[in-house]
Image (cartoon, helix red, strand yellow):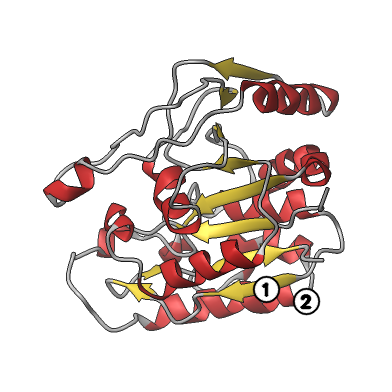
Amino acid sequence: MSTMPTLFVSHGAPTFALEPGEAGRELAALALALPTPRAILIASPHWMSPAVSLTASDRPETIHDFGGFPAPLYGLRYPAPGDPALAARAIGLLAAAGVDALADPRRGLDHGAWVPLRHMYPDAAVPVVQISMPGRRPASWFHALGRALSPLRDEGVLIVGSGSLTHNLYEFTGAAAGTTPYVSAFAQWIADTLAAGDVDALLDYRRLAPHAERAHPTDEHLMPLMFARGAAGADAGARRLAAADVRYGMLAMDAYVFGEA
């Protein structure tokens, strides 16, 4: 069985489901190039919880956890099967790392999970388990969370962190706009830091990265990057995708592949 890489994807606004652009095309091409995973374990900041939880339904529902968007979005479904056995395996790995985790048989997949997966695996045939992201944890905690789940890569599981490389919704206008300069500066710092393999700097991005506070007034949408990087292992390389795709002037759609063979 192939050892899978790990991924960070920017899921943008919910309209990404209908407007793939460069990011959607590159995610689709990536999925075709990768070995078909046995299952997918995905983290999204749209499921925040007091403790780590994992979906444990045989057939998780598609959650439309947004309002005020075009009507066609609410008709979309992503009917991927669940994988309760994978959820149990992940809970065991987390317990071994000292992290308590719970199985949630009722929770479905929020748009942070199903929107990018819809571009990668449109037939929804690969089983999906979503893991929640507890709030008020430092970047190092999410990196360690991913690291604890890294053995799943050798079991054919694709580990994905779905967030947003930049995420300042105070500046969201809903209209097309040129890229705001701080977005490019922040995205380039992340790219350079990942290329250098400087995990310590990445985890200290809030202090070291240019415009960090503006790029992420709150940091939950960048923590999936820390999760995916941690799951990749210490010496994993990074490949950047969708670097030129910026939505509404302030949502950078960058994606990263870590630990490719």
The image quarter in which residue 257 lies: bottom right
Q: Is residue 69 above or below residue 236?
A: above
Question: What residue appears at the point 63 percent right and 76 percent down from the top-left corner?
Answer: 191
Between circles 1 and 2, the one closer to the viewer is: 1
- Asked whether residue 213 is in view, the answer is yes
- Asked whether residue 218 is in view, the answer is no
Closer to the camera, 74 or 138?
74
- Expressed as whole percent of the image width and height from the top left, the position of residue 252 reads 43, 70
Left-right relation of 166 to 223: left
The image quarter in which residue 145 lies: top right
**Disc 2 target residue:** 196
Closer to the camera, 45 or 58?
58
**Disc 1 target residue:** 239
Question: What residue appears at the point 30 percent right and 75 percent down from the top-left corner?
Answer: 249
The image quarter in which residue 133 lies: top right
Closer to the camera, 123 or 172?
123
Marking on residue 260: none
- Expressed as whole percent of the image width and height from the top left, the position of residue 150 reads 79, 44
Badge 1 marks a residue whose secondary structure is strand
Amino acid on which disc 1 is placed: Arg
Q: Is residue 31 above or below residue 135?
A: below
Badge 2 marks a residue whose secondary structure is loop
The answer for how far apart the CA atoms under marks 1 and 2 are is 12 Å
Amino acid on which disc 2 is placed: Ala
Left-right relation of 176 to 138: left
Left-right relation of 44 to 110: right
Quadrant placement of the C terminus: bottom right
Sooner in the amino-acid sequence: mark 1 or mark 2? 2
Question: What residue appears at the point 58 percent right and 24 percent down from the top-left corner?
Answer: 53
- Expressed as whole percent of the image width and height from the top left, the position of residue 104 reads 53, 17
Question: What residue appears at the point 58 percent right and 60 percent down from the top-left corner?
Answer: 206
